[in-house]
Image (cartoon, rainbow, N blue to C red):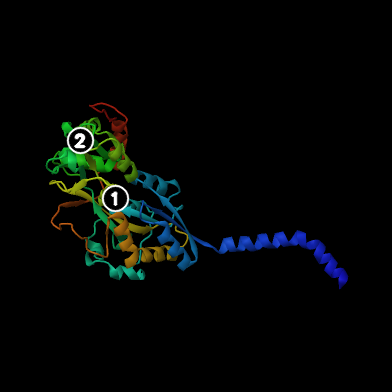
Amino acid sequence: MFALALIMSYLRPLWFPLLLMCLCTQVAADERTLRVLAWPGYADSDLVAVFEQRQHVRVEVTLVGSDEVLRSKMAEHQGADFDVIAANTAEVHRYAGLGLLQPLRPERIANTSRQLPRFRDYARIPDIRVGDQVYAIPYVWSDMGLIYDRHQFVQPPDSIASLWDPNLQGRVLAFNTSNHNFSLASLALGGDPFVIRSQDFAHVSEKLIDLRRNVLTFYSLPEEAAELFRSHKVALVFANYGRQQLKQLQDAGADVGYVVPREGALAWLDCWAVSRKAQDPALAYSWINYMLEPQVSLALSQRQALNNTLHEPEGQASSQPLIWLRPVEDDGRRAALWQRIVSGERAPLQEAP
């Protein structure tokens, strides 16, 4: 017996680390991970922590600042890097068409019953259905209006054309994106924001070149826009992030106003969708259900000034004209032309036949 104990004491320094390593490996293997692709403010760390504790999982959040970045993330490994994503309805339609999303069973997400009726009427929400299948659950929405410095306007701007006002040259901020900017320019010219005829692209491109000449710069993130607004005495901002940007500037002490132009404001409805290659679809469903809990949706609205799908927005006129984002005629063409425009090319832009 003494000999056995002596042998064990001799071997312990050898086998104990191996045993500990095996146990740690097993725990790591048993830990579930949810990979979330979302926009700033959609998955704050304190809210994520509550979900992790409830589900005994780890959540990895990847943030994006534009639809183009979102697309590149999804395209890199055909969506296999993420389980659940936040995207606007036009992007959802695109991803579903590419086979990157899996159809959902809304009845398995209990908190959808808490949503306002118009956000549960999937047949009337553009682009989240393909055929008879639903590919996304509405989560948050906002118009993309104009933020203006009250000290630099006698009257609030009332038109998209204000972005091109030569009196504001060098004091305008616009967003660095292709689809929205082509839509804005087409709208400013009186055209369809989502279907630009082939023969009209040259005219719309020239309009965007004029915009490039008028802006201080094109921003990518709301924090960047806020800093530029403060440091360069910006007068007017196209609010790609909607009222989230308005709140950010107001919280920083800026005396700013917000308007929906008379032509209407582009508006987005972001949804949660599940990747076709999600590792744990049930866990992704749990995440969506958690995001639709009243306290979580309310936190989103209070912190980001964005409209959730459970409560009617306060202080916003329902008569304001909103133009919900739709898929565009040729996003590849828009993206290619935009890169040339933002890089400084002059009109006329010649396209390959």
Q: Which mark is residue 134?
A: none
Who's the residue at 18% across and 52% down the image?
322
Picture disc at residue 251: 1
Q: Total marks drawn? A: 2
Local packing at callout 2 (Cα closer than 10 Å; few below 14, some 14-19, many 20+) is many
Question: Where's residue 200, x and y in %?
Answer: 18, 36
Q: Quick one: quadrant of the C terminus?
A: top left
First-in-chain label (2 vs 1): 2
Q: Is residue 260 left or right of residue 94?
A: left
Task: Give coordinates of residue 47: x percent, y percent.
Answer: 40, 61
Residue 149 seen:
yes
- Residue at image coords 18%, 43%: 150
The extreme front residue here reads 253
* Residue 28: quadrant of the picture: bottom right
Name the element at disc 2: helix
Corner quadrant of residue 123:
bottom left
Task: For label 1, count other residues whose C-alpha is less than 10 Å away and answer few (under 14), some (14-19) or many (20+).
Answer: few
Identify which residue is drawn at 30% across, 63% down: 298
The answer to which quarter of the image holds residue 295 is: bottom left
The amino acid marked with disc number 2 is Val
- Tell me the SS state at disc 1: helix
x%, y% of residue 80?
46, 53
Q: Looking at the picture, does residue 125 appear above or below residue 334? A: below
Whether 326 is drawn above or below 112: the answer is above
Q: Residue furthest bottom?
A: 1
Task: Report which residue position mark 2 lands on.
Answer: 204
The answer to whether residue 175 is above or below residue 33 is above
Please state which of the two labelled residues, at mark 2 or mark 1, is closer to the viewer: 1
